[in-house]
Structures are given as structure tokens and as C-alpha cells.
Image (cartoon, rainbow, N blue to C red):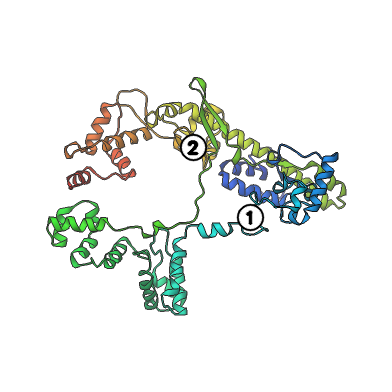
Amino acid sequence: MALSARLEVRQGQGLVITPQLQQAIKLLQMSNIELEAFVEVELERNPLLQRDERDNEPEDTPDTEGPAALEQVADSEARADLDATHDEASPGERATGDAPELEGMGAADVGGAIDWSKAGSGGSFERDGEGMEGAYTRELTLAEHLTEQLSASGLTTGETAIAHVLIDAVDEGGYLRAETPEVALRLGCDVEAVEKVLTVIQGFDPVGVAARDVRECLMIQLKDRNRYDPAIAALLDNLPLLARRDLSSLKKACGVDDEDLREMIAEIRGLTPRPGAAFGGEPTTPVAPDVFVKEGPGGLWHVELNSDTLPRLLVDHRYHARVSGQSKTDQEKTFVTDCLAQANWLMKSLDQRARTILKVSSEIVRQQDAFLAFGVQHLRPLNLKTVAEAIGMHESTVSRVTSNKYMATPRGVFEMKFFFTSAIQSSEGGEAHSAESVRDKIKHLIATEAAEADVHSDDRIVEILKRDGVDIARRTVAKYREAMRIPSSVDRRRRLKEPA
């Protein structure tokens, strides 16, 4: 059969994801911080988008017509030198005297004393900054504190450069997170020179800073107290034994008796394993909940979106009408049309995102109302499929909605993923138990251990839970216990043996 080229018409079905649909999907899984950054980019590149700031305007709008307005204009002209300090105000706003700092000032105030109590806290008239007071009252960071001590260290110019690199590699806990050979290779110097500068920095305040591990940190502090001897050096070499409370092995390793070992352990406990924790760090951004859950009358739960985390945008149709009327070339008309379409689609996507978050959150609250009312022991097993079927959405949509989203409840702020827990079957054939509630039961059992004889092994915990109707394996109990960083029964029994 000869090969030949021909045209065929075929009909088929396929899923095509448009760029707009891809954008809507991405918006669903964005956190409120990521969404704010995305909206800022859209505001810069789309001239038809603007922020909706109508709620930020003062309620008492000044009358723009009549004698009162004329008197206000006269007052504003007399205070033109003061109006120049308002960078964000437009010329029209300065002419009408709408700047908030000038409200309430009459004509008689112009020539007399000026009330500066409402002035900004910044140290400059041109920007709202930290101000002189904030700069001097702000807590120093560890890096700033170490840098201040460099001037009195007697280091040369080259050594000071090495010191700056090492200080930059010190984390907030005070530990050096860089290898000296890597620093030497990066700076093109000898390892000995880096080690020499590191020794100088380790003599800075706080004592123990720039150590490379816990042992070195404690050793520096002991040397500063003149308490570093061979016995306590052996103790530092066997810190894992100390963590396991294996006192008999520690006595053999250190060659001391019980009394000396107790004194050495007390000495170690008096040291600081994180010397940099006393200094300020970079400001942390608090979690802003996306949804608020409040208890209403009759025990009903009300779910509402946090309006502060939702971007408020408007499409400027007046500007679109003016610009589209002045467009001459096809390229200009296409640009304006695309901007309008993208702005309308973004508004629709943001509205759909808010509605979807509210819908998913309401179903989560409906499923986990027992947790909200009675606590974590009543947390029900829940998966994405259950919520998706209840609200008529796909599991992937629910997964995107609950990613990086937080819910503020009377019991605290939780990530939405917290409410999705696996199920542990009941030993009596009843309702399954949530894995989170089982973890809480294990934690409560261990926390109530008061004496050495009351320490529960993992097998004992399995027996107790089975009596309560929880069918769980011993390895699962061990996994949950280790995830909560709870030591084994042997270590807990050793800890109870130690004298107070």
C-alpha cells in the first residue's frame, strides 16, 4: 500500500485548561500573604484595576459647596507649607484641606501654637519610618550585638572581614552554621586564619556564641567559669547518655561517684544551650486567619470570612471608557481590551475563591462541631473525599482550598488541614476514632504518671486504649509517642528515679 498525505476531520473530547482557569486554580491554593503579593503585581501591570478604599474614607465628608468650603479653602492656602508634608495627597486634596492631620484646625490656629500630637511617629517628614525613638528602643539582634564588639577586638582589616562573614553565619540560637574550610575557600584565605578569628568571636558576649555544636557551646561557658576539667569534659563527650538518663554509664565514663555526678549535672543545667535566644531576631509575621468561627445562640456555629485578608479591588470603567475612546492603533485597542478582560476575570476569580473557602470551611465546622464544643478528644475522622462529596466539589479543589489556610475558633487558630485526620477503628465495632484524639489520649496517659510504678509501657497503653474501645497496634502507639517527642517508658522511669 502506497503512503500518501491526506486530510481527515475527526471529532473528539479533551480538557483544555485556559490561562484564566489556571490562574483561578492557583488563586485557590494561595495563602493570604501570597495572594496579597499577587494582587500587588496585578495592580502595577493593569491600569484598570484599583483598590477599593471607600471604607477608609472619613465618615464626615466636608461639604464641597457653600461658605464652609470657601473658608476651608482659604485656611488650606494659608497652610500650604504644612500641606507639603503629605506626600500621598494629590494637589486637589491639598487644596480642599482633606489631609487628616489638618482636620479640626481653624484659621486662628495658623498663626498660633500648632498641636503636634497627631503628627506621625517617624523621624522624617518625607516618609513614615521607624523614627529615631523606634531605632533606639528596638531590641538589638544578635548579629548587631556581635558587630558592635568587633571595634574593640583588635582585629586587622582582613580579620574583620572574616569576622563579618562568620557573624552572618551565626543563627538566632547563637550557633555557627558554616564550616571553616568553606569560609576559607570562599574568602581565599587559610583555614588557620578563620579559626583564629572564630576563637576571638567565641570570646564575645554572650558566652558560648558561635559554637558549632552543643558540646562546644557548653565547653566555652564552662571555660569562662573556670569549671572545665577532665571529668566534666568526659561528661560533655557523653551527652547522649545524659539525655537518656543513663547515670550508671555516665559514672563509669567520667570516673566519679554519685555525688560528683549530681554536681556536674547541676553545673550543666545552669548553662545556656542557646546563648543567642536572649536577643531580638527578625520580626515574625503572625498568622492571619482566613475564617472566623463563632458560637451563636442555641449552640450553632457561625462561619465568616476575615475581610482583612481579602483583597478589595475595583475595575475603573470610567478610565476604560476614556482610554478606549482615545485609542488609535489596533495594538492600543487590543491592550485596553485585554486589560479589561483580565481585570473582570480576576474580580470573578477572587469572588469565587472567597465563596469556595467559605463553603469548605462551613462543611468542616459542620463535621467537627463536637471538637469545637467539647475538645480534641471528640475530633472525628475526616478526609477530603467526605467534604468534597458533601459540597459537590472535587477532592483536588478541597485540597487546594485547605492548603495554607487558617481557621480561628474559640479553641485557637488551626490550619484547615488539622481537621482532616485518619480513622482508627473501634475495638467494639462502633464509631471510628480520630488519630488526633488518640494521640491526645496517649499524651494524657503519660502525663498522669506520678510514680515509677505507674509508668506505662507501649504495650500497657495499648491495653488501656483497647478497654476504651480503641483498636490500635503497639507500633502505632510508639510512632505517635515519638512524634510527640515523648521518651520511652525506660527513659521516663529513669527520670522519675532521679532526685529532685
Q: Position of residue 253 (x, y in %)?
A: 16, 61
Identity of the residue drawn at 34% across and 33% down: 438
In this view, the residue in front, 155 or 365, is 155
- Total of numbered circles in the picture? 2
| Residue type indicated by callout 2 | Met
In this image, 162 relative to 41: left or right? left
Kindly state the secondary structure of the residue where label 2 is placed.
helix
The numbered mark at residue 128 is 1
Q: Position of residue 138 (x, y in %)?
A: 50, 57
Residue 196 lies in quadrant = bottom left
Q: Is residue 7 visible?
A: no
Q: CA distance from mark 2 to mark 1?
A: 36 Å
The numbered mark at residue 416 is 2
Q: Is residue 351 visible?
A: yes
Task: Classify 10 Å Cα crowding around label 1: few (below 14), some (14-19), many (20 and above).
Answer: few
Kindly state the secondary structure of the residue where label 1 is placed.
loop
